[in-house]
Every structure is written in structure tokens, then in C-alpha cells.
Amino acid sequence: MNRDEISWTDQSAPSMPLALAGVGERVRIVDVSGQRTTTKRLESMGLRVGVECEIVQRQGNGVVVQVENTRLALGTGLLHRVRVDHVR
């Protein structure tokens, strides 16, 4: 990671990129990485460490996730910046 990138991490669980989660899966965000502008953008949309979300739909390379009462459409680039763990 270069000096312009930041990462917020919960190291307690194995994780995977949000891009690999399947439709209907509930996941908890354990890491958000990237340049400061990217991480701030994701945080402003509600995607921050500790938040649970559900994969609602996949279309092409994009995914629709539900975070609380909001649905967000995310492209591949952002999906790989967010690491998640399955909610048990």
C-alpha cells in the first residue's frame, strides 16, 4: 500500500472481497482500502468497517447492496476495495 492509501481493518476474521459475495448473502465489512478519496466516498455511502449489508442483485460486473434502508449500485473497482466476512 502506498502512502496515499489508507485501510481500516478488523483483523479478527478471514475475509473476501465484496465482489465475491453471492446474491442473498449477508456480510459484515471488515476492511475498506484505497486512496483517501475512495475510502471517504465509501464511508459517506455507509460502507464502513462493522456495517452489515446484503447482496441484493448482480448485473454484469456490478452489484446492488443493501446497507440499512439504502440500496447502492457498486462497480467492480469499488467492490474489490471492500473486504467482508459472512454474517453467521
Image (tube, rainbow, N blue to C red):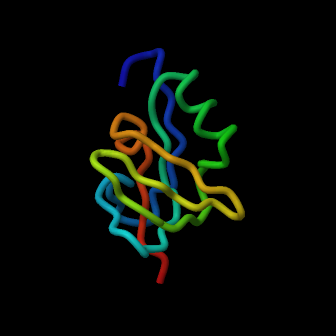
Q: What residue lies at 32% left-to-right and 58% top-to-bottom?
A: 16
User: From the image, which quarter does the N terminus lie in?
Assistant: top left
Residue 59: % across, % down: 33, 53
Residue 33: % across, % down: 46, 36
Report how many numbered discs are placed on residues in the image.
0
Q: Of all residues shown, which one is farthest toward the bottom?
A: 88
Residue 88: % across, % down: 47, 84
In the image shown, does 73 or 7 lie closer to the viewer?
73
Residue 21: % across, % down: 34, 64
Is 59 located above or below residue 33 in the figure? below
In the image shown, does 46 or 50 lie closer to the viewer?
46
Is 23 located above or below residue 83 in the figure? below
Res 40 → quadrant:
top right
Is 31 located above or below residue 34 in the figure? below
Q: What residue lies at 42% left-to-right and 66% top-to-bottom?
A: 85
- Using residue 64 as the reference point, say whether residue 48 is left or right of it: right
Q: What residue lies at 47% left-to-right and 66% top-to-bottom?
A: 56
Q: Of all residues shown, which one is farthest toward the front?
A: 59
Q: What residue lies at 56% left-to-right and 32% top-to-bottom?
A: 39
